[in-house]
Image (tube, helix red, strand yellow):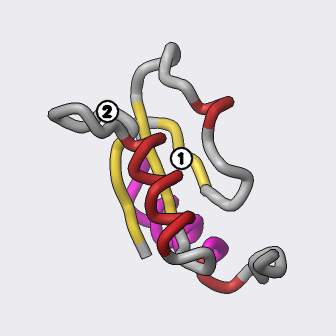
Amino acid sequence: MIFADIRLPGSMDGVKLARAACTLWPTIRIVLTSGAASDRTDALPDSVTFIPKPWRGLGVLVEADKAICEPQPPVA
């Protein structure tokens, strides 16, 4: 599982990270977060869980559990 912010240093942001990870590992679980309203959440793959900031630790654990337990769509 990957838990990352949409805003990352360098040329790869969280959206690019999610797309690359989903391409390499189609069944990987990804949870992204961001505190900026302008971040590109509409560009996230459907399988990615998004948690807006501010969040509490329990909220992250709940969303991570859902991301892990919910079935992924079949790999084409």
Relative to 43, say whether 24 is above or below. Answer: below
Based on the picture, tell me whether residue 32 belongs to the magenta stretch. no
Q: Earlier in the sequence, mark 2 or mark 1?
A: 2
Q: Is residue 38 left or right of residue 17?
A: right
Relative to 65, say whether 54 is above or below. Answer: above
- The span picked out in magenta is 55-67
Residue 51 numbered mark, or none: 1
Q: Position of residue 63 (x, y in %)?
A: 58, 65
Q: Is residue 48 left or right of residue 59?
A: right
The residue shown at (75%, 77%) is: 72
The residue shown at (34%, 53%) is: 4
What whole-number distance in Å separates the C-alpha atoms at marks 2 and 1? 13 Å
Name the residue that disc number 2 marks. Answer: 7
Q: Position of residue 1 (x, y in %)?
A: 43, 76
Tell me which amino acid carries mark 2: Arg
Q: Position of residue 55 (x, y in %)?
A: 43, 46
